[in-house]
Image: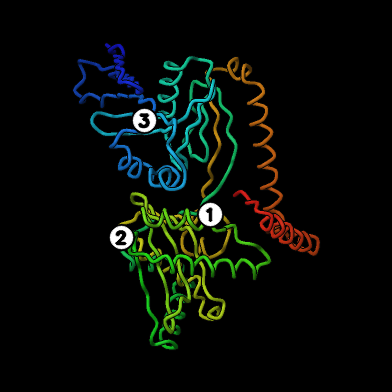
Amino acid sequence: MQAQPETHMTLHHDKMNVEISSKPAQDCSASHPPLPRHESSLTENGVPSFAEVELDRLYGSLYSSLSHFRTCDNLDGVNTYVAREGSRVSAIFLYRVAGKSIQVINEGMRLSAEDVSRFCDALFARYGRNVNVSFHAVQIDGPVLPFTQQRFFCTEDFVATLPDSADAYLASLGSATRKNIKRHKNRLERAFPDLQYRLDAKEAAKEEDVRDVIALNRIRMAQKSQASFIDEDETQRILRIVRACGKVFSVRIDGRLAAGAIVLQIGDSVISKVNAHDARYDDYRLGMLCCYLAVCAAIESGAKRFHFGHGRYEYKTALLGKHEYYDHVAIYRSRLHMLLHARQATRIAYDGYRFEASRWLLDRIDTGDGQGWALLRQALAVWRSRKHRHGSRLTA
């Protein structure tokens, strides 16, 4: 017989904790062990102290980490939902409430539809059936039943699943990629005997090195008729996040930075933030080589995934990055409740279809054959450059 859900509510000054727990139905005559007990809690106006480690473990996403929110955003007005299966934390969602809209602020998560359904059940019970719940840049493995939802593509990433050793990673690359990496690395080391590889983490990473990598990135973008989005404000954010969870991998020749990669480690994931190299070493494929060595360094640190970020470049797939899509998802209690939010639902649909159409067109421009597509590629490069110069940032 299925146990009825148990609900406990306690008030502590400006924080409210709501705990909901239930046991799955069990057949007492069966010999199978009982399924894990599902429990969940809501902490309003606060984030539990254990959440930092668990968020990193669960999601390995920069934009779901407290390191990101503390250094580049804020946690004002944030509430926390925690789900457990037995003693194990199975989901943590940080969210803000604005009227009848609830926005989950952690992003880049891979989620089960079951976890999302339980979360929505808890929110509808706490805040009423007429609220809507939004996730941004997430992967959900199926429909969030029994609710009504809108789901649109919003960004992408290239992610490599990493083996246990750098040797195993090299062996798993395509034969041509493996051959080229070995050849260019050997050529580079023979040509420049004073070549140095260096990895500095967190506080040990020098501000000068971070700025030098960013400077190389600006130069490379300019060579592509594009302007880097990394202005001084963004540079300061990168410096703060590097001190919290970052690393700087550098390749030096004659004591000068020839290539570098700024990466961030969140749980067992490493996220590429900025990559750049000096064009004088293009003949050695130093950009590709630097990225490969950064992946190897991630493997040595125990990482299980390497995120190359959005942007479709051949080197990412050559280094085993798999194309992954992330969606914006809005969830309503029912179709009737979606109609009650008709203005918001219409805006989400308009933005979603417009963005998907623009991505389709950009894909065709990037890959289309013929003079017409080539002219469009040139026009797109000019447009992007002008947008960047005016401080705009092209979405993924």
Label 1 vs 3, first from the N-terminus: 3
Please report whichever mark, 1 or 2, sits nearer to the chain's N-terminal start: 1
Q: Is residue 175 visible?
A: no
Crowd band around label 3 with a 10 angstrom C-alpha radius: few (<14), some (14–19), many (20+): some
SS assignment at label 3: loop
Along the viewing direction, whichever of 124 and 389 lies nearer the viewer: 389
**Up-down relation of residue 381 to residue 339 (above or below):** below
In three-dimensional space, the C-alpha distance between marks 2 and 3, rounded to whole angstroms, equals 32 Å
Which residue is located at x 52 percent, y 19 percent?
A: 131
Kindly identify which residue carries mark 3: 46
- Residue 242 placed where, x, y %? 40, 57
Q: Dot 1: within a 10 Å radius of its alpha carbon, few (fewer than 14), some, or many (20 or more) residues?
A: few
Query: Residue 188: x and y, percent?
Result: 45, 83
Q: Which mark is residue 233?
A: 1
Kindly identify the residue that appears in the image at 48 percent across and 58 percent down.
Answer: 273
Q: Quadrant of the N terminus?
A: top left
Secondary structure of the residue carrying numbered label 2: loop
The amino acid beneath tag 1 is Asp
Tell me the mark number nearer the camera, choosing from 2 and 3.
Answer: 3
Percent position of residue 326, x then y: 53, 42
Q: How is the image coloured?
A: rainbow
Query: Which amino acid type is marked by label 2?
Result: Ser
- The residue that mark 2 highlights is 301
Question: What secondary structure is found at the residue carrying circle 1?
Answer: helix
Q: Amino acid at mark 3?
A: Gly
Q: Residues within 10 Å of mark 2 (few under 14, many from 20)?
A: some
Image point 26% across, 34% down: which residue?
88
The reply to whether the C-beta atoms of the residues labelled 1 and 2 are less than 8 Å apart is: no
Instruction: Judge depth for marks 1 and 2 and give the one in front.
Output: 1
In the rendered structure, which disc, 2 or 3, sits on the residue that comes first in sequence?
3
Foreground pick, 243 / 142 = 243
**Total label count?**
3
